[in-house]
Amino acid sequence: MNTQLKEFFRFLVDFSDEELEEVWTFFHPRKIKKGEFLTIPGETAYECGFVLKGCFRVYYLVDGKESTRFIGCENIFMSSVPSFTTQKPSVEYVEALENLDLLMLSYNDLQKMYELSPKWERMVRILAEYSYNEQQKRIYSLIAHSAQQRYEDLTKSRPDLIQRVPQYIIANYLGISPETLSRIRKL
């Protein structure tokens, strides 16, 4: 099994080498070029991908305007999660912001993993809880913090994003205009 993915799984749950090797055949490599999409609205996300290398974002198009919901980089699973978990068409875009090296896992193979051991269901529950809590923090930040505070929080918690992601996407993620972000950065 890929070392990066093995370390990720073991960080969450104490898997044995045998348990990890048992599921390795469920994963297959995939490359997505910068600017390409893993999922677009109307398509169903039949797979999720573990990011070995690269950066992506998840966004909606509302009245012709982009609204970035999430930005992620290495060592995270990416997908249109609502589409993947329900196996219904997506309402969001999942776009590569950099060239991506992924290990893909199908929805059906994830179901097989659940049958192999309760540890896999536990791992996904831990990931879901973490994701939920992070989204709640983000919602609170958008409601309760100033634009400057949101930017400062992002630079402290994810300085890599500031260097890797175009500023107009950072602004969009923070819920501000690129001009406002430019002013904040000059302070």
Image (cartoon, rainbow, N blue to C red):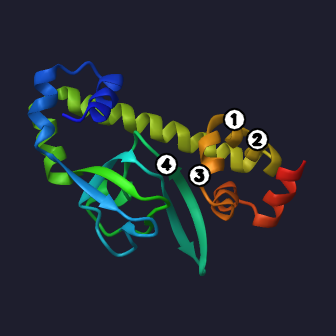
Residue 13 x, y percent position in the rendering: 29, 22
Residue 127 x, y percent position in the rendering: 38, 36
Residue under the point 79% across and 51% down: 147
| Residue 180 at least partly seen | yes
Mark toward the start of the polypeptide (3 vs 2): 2
Residue marked by disc 1: 156
Q: Is residue 151 left or right of residue 96?
A: right
Seen from the viewer's position, the closer of residues 105 and 137 is: 105
Q: In which quarter of the view is residue 180 placed?
A: bottom right
Residue 10 x, y percent position in the rendering: 30, 23
Q: Amino acid at mark 3?
A: Arg
Q: Residues within 10 Å of mark 1 (few under 14, many from 20)?
A: few
Tag shown at residue 72: 4
| 3 and 2 marks in contact (CB < 8 Å) | no
Helix or strand or loop: what does disc 1 sit on? helix
Residue marked by disc 3: 164
Residue marked by disc 2: 152
